[in-house]
Each structure stands twice: as C-alpha cells, then as structure tokens.
Amino acid sequence: MAAHEVPQDAYLLDVREDDEWSAGHAEGAKHIPMGQLVERLDELPSDGLVHVVCRSGGRSARVTAYLNQNGWDAVNVDGGMQHWQAAGRPLVGESGAEPTVI
C-alpha cells in the first residue's frame, strides 16, 4: 500500500529504531522497533488492519510477513517513511528540531 493511501485513522506500526523514530514519525503511530516485536506482540490490536512502516520498506515487509503468518492482518507501507514524507504526509519529531526521516 502506498503511503498516500494509508487512512488517517489507520493503526500504523513503526518498526524503526529509536533514533529514526525521534527524528520524525507519523503522528499517532505505534513505535515498536523490529528487534522488540516478538516480545511486544501483545501491544498490537487483535483485530483490524495493521499498517507497518519503516524507513524504506524492507524491515516493514519482513514484519508484515511475520504478522500475517501469525494471525494478524497486516500490510506493508511501500517505500516507508521516505515515501510518507515525499507524499507530504505530516511528521512529528521528539527532539524539537524540524521533523525529518533519517
């Protein structure tokens, strides 16, 4: 699914690392770094579609496949946060600096 197609009220799971998240992320997204996913699966909704995003789409594609194999309904956000930003979708940051995708 393309970044511009993700509904505003979608459940968006960001699987990037802490520094990437802090630099800029989608408002309202849930942050669980890929390496912590298995131990934090209970934080994901048990029903509904989970949109998974990373920087460019590689990590999120792996997480999407894992979730789909384990009972979730998940879709990869193609192109990741790079395409999100390029599509003009809003970003928020944690550092106080202008939010960006790193």
Image (cartoon, helix red, strand yellow):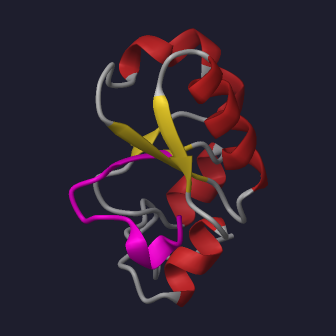
Q: Position of residue 7 (x, y in %)?
A: 29, 64
Does the magenta run of residues contain 93? no
Name above or below for residue 96 compared with residue 75.
below
Q: Position of residue 17 (x, y in %)?
A: 66, 45
Q: In screen coordinates, is 41 left or right of 27?
A: right
Residue at x 58% of width, y 28% of height = 68
Does the magenta run of residues contain 5? yes
Residue 19 or residue 3, whichever sits in front:
3
Res. 100 visible in picture? no
The C terminus: image quadrant: bottom right
Q: Position of residue 26 (x, y in %)?
A: 39, 63
Name above or below for residue 26 compared with residue 42.
below
Q: Quadrant of residue 90?
A: bottom left
Q: In screen coordinates, is 75 left or right of 55?
A: left
Residue at x 38% of width, y 65% of height = 6
Q: Which residues are magenta?
A: 1-13
